[in-house]
Amino acid sequence: MPLNDFEPISKRRTIFAAKDSSVHFVYSLLVRISWFLLRIVALFHKKIDLFVKGRKTTFSILDQSLKEEDQVIWMHVASLGEFEQGLPIIEKLKDEYPAHKILVTFFSPSGYEIRKDTKSADVVCYLPMDTIKNARLFMDKVNPKLAIFVKYEIWPNFLKELNQRSIPALLVSAIFKKKQIYFKSFGGFMRKALITFEHIFVQDEKSKTLLESIQIKNATISGDTRFDRVSQILERDNNNEIIQNFKQDKICLVAGSTWPEDEKIIMPSINTSERAIKWIIAPHNIKADHIEKLKKSVFKKVLCYSEGDANSIGEYEVLVIDNIGLLTQIYSYADLAYVGGGFATGLHNTLEPAVFGIPVIIGPNYHGFKEAEELVKKKGIQVISNNKDLEQLLSAFLDKKPYSLLQETGGTNTTYISENKGASVQIVAHIRTLL
């Protein structure tokens, strides 16, 4: 079928119906080889062990949780970040289609292990490896009415099976770059996978233009559903007595999702600053040995959150968060935020603090993170390369009362998020035409 033929899904069942091409054969073979190798690596690597063992339970979870008569909406995500992107859609679908069951599948253990008990979905499990056999068995057990893939998750054999069964599939919050295989001369196999989507909701004009360059025209610019997700944070109860009593009436800087590389940059400011600031550090790694090392590097009065007493915690200057699940709540108490990862493996979520209308500081490795790139241009996010840069920013933000630059920069972030909300509303409106 030519790439510019976009018939309704019921008429597109032949996209993958012909005998598998040599590329498809090689792809499926590589998936099987990868699974074999992963089972060997799992013997020596904890995360890969979770990856492998978790997938061995997928079909039993489906058998226990789903009945033949169930009407299932299936969403697949890579990890925690993509789950957060999909969550506004899930919540709207639960409200509008209470008789349907929501199935969420994860690719990564880091997402599954944190959200496997979420109340937002009826069933949570790993996505099996993308083999023809697994895809057929999965569809036999789930038989979804609709499949939703988030951002980058494109698995040819699962999409082929959905297509052959005339089950509509959507790709949401997608973002495309010219360097991806879909836009290469040798990317025909993966382009065919894209064609199977009933509709693609992209984050920006550039992504839509790239799709049009390969004759894919069933795409809509809806933006990123993460803006809807972070906006919901403002509606939650973010009160925390320990954090409130720690902060009191002082300026508070929250350093969230920090790596050792980030902590090396911010620690001199914590230890030498004479400003009346309260510091909260929420490290990415909360293992006991790292928490202990972090505490020892602080020269001021420091306490871990788990040790905190709501009545006496105000005496301390530095608070180390040694558990998970509190960061977005803690950001609500911040006057200024530092988001980690920009000196290490990759920038963490900058929208979570930005939604509270505060300035955000990051390291230099933020390229490829669309919202960070845009907010850097708007100056709602400030970039540092070393501690000297950090000190200059702290001086600009905090040494001139009534903190006009602090408020102005935070307002930039508030406006940016407000202007980019609404993607989930647009996507769910389309879903209504399919269910």
Image (tube, helix red, strand yellow):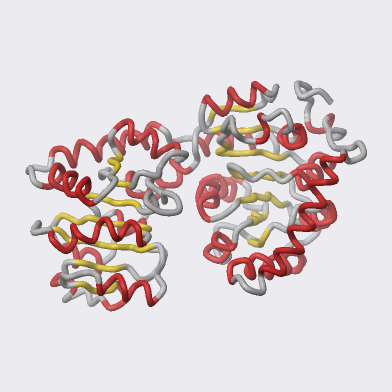
* Viewer-proximal residue among 74 and 6: 6
Furthest-right residue in view? Answer: 19
User: Which residue lies at the image location 76% right of the left edge and 47% below the top edge?
Assistant: 158
Q: Which image quadrant is residue 122 in?
A: bottom right
* Viewer-proximal residue among 420 and 190: 190
> How far across and down, in percent of the image, does residue 110 sit?
54, 62
Asked if residue 325 lies left or right of residue 7, the reply is left
The image quadrant where one finds the C terminus is: top right
- Rendered position, 340 above or below 150: below
> How far across and down, in percent of the image, does residue 146 sit?
71, 44
Residue 279 is at least partly visible in this image: yes
How many numbered discs sit on the rendered protein?
Answer: 0
The image quadrant where one finds the N terminus is: top right
User: Which residue lies at the image location 24% right of the left edge and 68% below the top edge?
Assistant: 319
Q: Which image quadrant is residue 406 in?
A: top left
> How far across and down, in percent of the image, does residue 248 sit?
15, 62
Q: Which image quadrant is residue 418 in?
A: top left
- Rendered position, 154 above or below 195: below
- Rendered position, 354 above or below 198: below
User: Which residue lies at the image location 23% right of the left edge and 61% below the top edge?
Assistant: 267
> How far across and down, in percent of the image, does residue 160 sit?
80, 42
Residue 135 is at least partly visible in this image: no
* Viewer-proximal residue among 190 and 89: 190
* Viewer-proximal residue among 380 and 244: 380
Asked if residue 373 lies left or right of residue 103, the reply is left
Asked if residue 315 lies left or right of residue 160, the reply is left
User: Which residue lies at the image location 71% right of the left edge and 69% below the top edge?
Assistant: 40
